[in-house]
Image: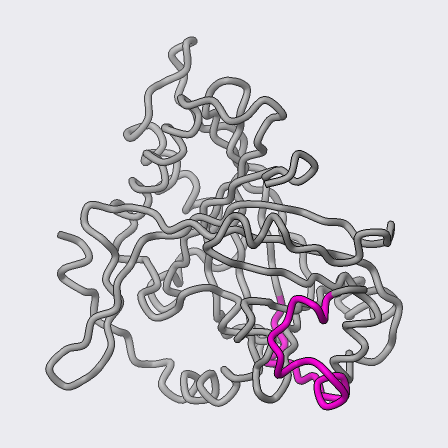
Amino acid sequence: MTAEIKLTAREYKLLLDPLRFKEAYGSRGVHVFWEKSLKPIIADCIDRRRSGKPRFKGEFGRPTERVIRFFDTDDMVLTRSEWSLRQRTRIVDDTEDHSEHELTLKLRTPDLFIAAATVVGAEDKSITDEFEEDIAPLAVAKFDTSGDERVILSSPASVRCRFARAFRRKIHASKPLGRLAEVYRLFHGFDANLTDSALGGIGRIARLLHGQVMLERVYNGATVALGAGIDGRFTFTEWYLRRTPRVQRVAEISFKLAIPEGGLARSAAQRALMLFTSLQDDLCDLVDLDNDSKTALALPARTRLIHHMERDSHARPEASARLCQ
């Protein structure tokens, strides 16, 4: 890894099953989740501060609302190359503000050196470059006797790490992105990071499609003191279908910590790991076992599946007994 490219943050993410998490909808539900679930877990799983106080601080405030779209080509060349393309649009007076959008091109890979060596828009000052580590539960997929797939979290709880390189810029456009060539123009050098199937004339004129449009509500303000001056900043994220805003598709709890210039102290890293594995154990009945990440739920390829889920939304999946052992 070059001296100029350094990990700036770690984010620990735990997807929750919306069908099991109905009590947490809205500001009131998120507040109750913090008070009744997260604060007791923090108090029980990690030591107290020198003052004797528990390490939780603050509370979740009112949400920030945005509209989310994820784009890919018909043959999912971005997804197959471990990239995602997300457009976020703010909401003003309950209306989507089409005058400005935040466009994020993100690589997620298990290989640290691939992420570190990835370059997009190096000379473009309108593009910000973030290099972070995404941490999720370690899980394995198993098939039962009927051939149905089940995802089982590891026991004891552990983690899976991927490295995320995110390139962001603002765009001013009233229409959604139409072609892959537009992404190449906005993020110079990006085409060199795709597979051969995305290159050349055919790749450049490939149409971009977006999946289900999501309404995102993000709650911030609650933190955990991990020691050595490091705070883990919690985020509770909800995604709803934009056209049916009462149908929740995503509930995610995460906490993020900045990595200081001199590196992350062992004590802070150890507390963060203990907290994350404890969240997996103590929230086991709420964990989403069907989805690897919230991004996958909004990709174009998931549109038919989401329609199917709408028809079957009354069905409540049974918890895996092995998960909670």
Residue 206 lies in the magenta-colored region: yes
> Can residue 29 be spotted in the picture?
no
Residue at 31% across / 65% down in the picture?
289
For the residue pair 150 and 174, the one nearer the viewer reads as 150
For the residue pair 226 and 223, the one nearer the viewer reads as 226
In this rendering, the answer to whether 50 lies above or below 121 is above
In this rendering, the answer to whether 322 lies above or below 270 is below
User: Start and end of the magenta stretch?
Assistant: 190-215
Q: Position of residue 256 (x, y in %)?
A: 53, 40
Residue at 74% across / 56% down in the picture?
168
For the residue pair 231 and 106, the one nearer the viewer reads as 106
Residue at 65% across / 76% down in the picture?
71
The answer to whether 157 appears left or right of 235 in the picture is left
The answer to whether 156 appears left or right of 92 in the picture is left
Q: Position of residue 16 (x, y in %)?
A: 39, 59
Residue 71 lies in the magenta-colored region: no
The answer to whether 48 appears left or right of 207 in the picture is left
In this rendering, the answer to whether 222 lies above or below 118 is above
